[in-house]
Image (cartoon, rainbow, N blue to C red):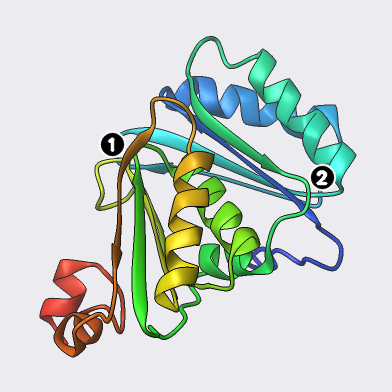
Amino acid sequence: MQPAPPISLSISPALALLEFESIAAGYLAADAMTKRAPIARIVAGTVQPGRLLVLLSGGVAEVEEAAAAGREISAGSLLDEVFLPAVHPGVVAGLLGERHPIADALGIVESHSAASAIHAGDAGLKGAEVALVELRLSDGLAGKGICFFTGTVSAVEVAVEIASAAVSPGHFLHAVVIPQLSPEIAATLHTGSNFSQNLQE
C-alpha cells in the first residue's frame, strides 16, 4: 500500500484540524466529512490522552464545508478545532516534522489542545518575522500542543503575543520569551524537545 503523499500547498491552500475527545465519535465525524465535500487529503488518528485528530487539506470551500459536517455530527465530543483558509507554509512544514535552527531568541506558546497550537503557530508566523523551530501535538504532552518560535527578541515577542491571542478560549496554558537563549539549552533543542530522544543523543 502506497503511503499518502505529503500535503501540497500548491493544490491545498486550506487546512483544518478537528480534535475529538471521543475516538468513536471522531471517526464517525471523519466519515461524514469525506462524504460531504471532495477534499484533497484527510488524515485521522489517535493521540494521547485518548483523543482523535482529523486533519483536512484542500480547497478553501471544500475544507470549510467538510469541517462543518464533522462539527455537526460530533455529538458533543469536539474538543477544539482550527480552520486556516490560507495556511502558512511554515505550519505545514512543522506538521511534517521539519525544524528550523534557533536564532537569537526563543518563544514558546503552550496550549491544552493540538488545534490551538496549530492556530498559534500560523498566527505567529503570519504576524512577525519569525521561524517555527518545532510544532508538537499531543503525544508525549498529555494532549497539549506547543509551538517554538525563533528570531530576533522583538520579533519573537510580537509572535508570542499574537500566537497566544489565537489560542481558543479556555485552551491557553502558558507563553514565554527567552532572549539570547543559552547555547546549552539551544543544543538540547537542536533535534527536538522530546526528553527520551535528547537523552540518547
- Residues marked 1 and 2 touching at CB (< 8 Å): no
In the structure shown, which secondary structural element does the residue marked by tag 1 occupy? loop
Give how far apart the Cα atoms at labels 1 and 2 are: 28 Å
Disc 2 residue crowd, few under 14, some 14–19, many 20+, Cα 10 Å: many
Residue 129, above or below 48: below
Disc 1 residue crowd, few under 14, some 14–19, many 20+, Cα 10 Å: some
Residue 56, above or below 155: above
Residue 141, above or below 81: below
Residue 196: x percent and y percent? Answer: 15, 70
The residue at which mark 1 appears reads as 49
**Residue 133, visible in the rendered structure:** no
Q: How many marks?
A: 2
State left or right for residue 113 relative to residue 176.
right
Please tell me which residue lies in front, 27 or 184. 184
Please tell me which residue lies in front, 67 or 32. 67
Tell me the quadrant of the picture where the C terminus can be found: bottom left
State left or right for residue 100 relative to residue 106.
right
First along the sequence among labels 1 and 2: 2
**Residue 10, visible in the rendered structure:** yes
The residue under the point 63% across, 24% down is 29
State left or right for residue 141 relative to residue 77.
left
The residue at which mark 2 appears reads as 39
Question: In the displayed image of the protein, which residue is found farthest to the left?
Answer: 199
Residue 34: x percent and y percent? Answer: 76, 34
- The amino acid marked with disc number 1 is Pro
Query: What mark, if any, has residue 19 been given in the picture?
Result: none
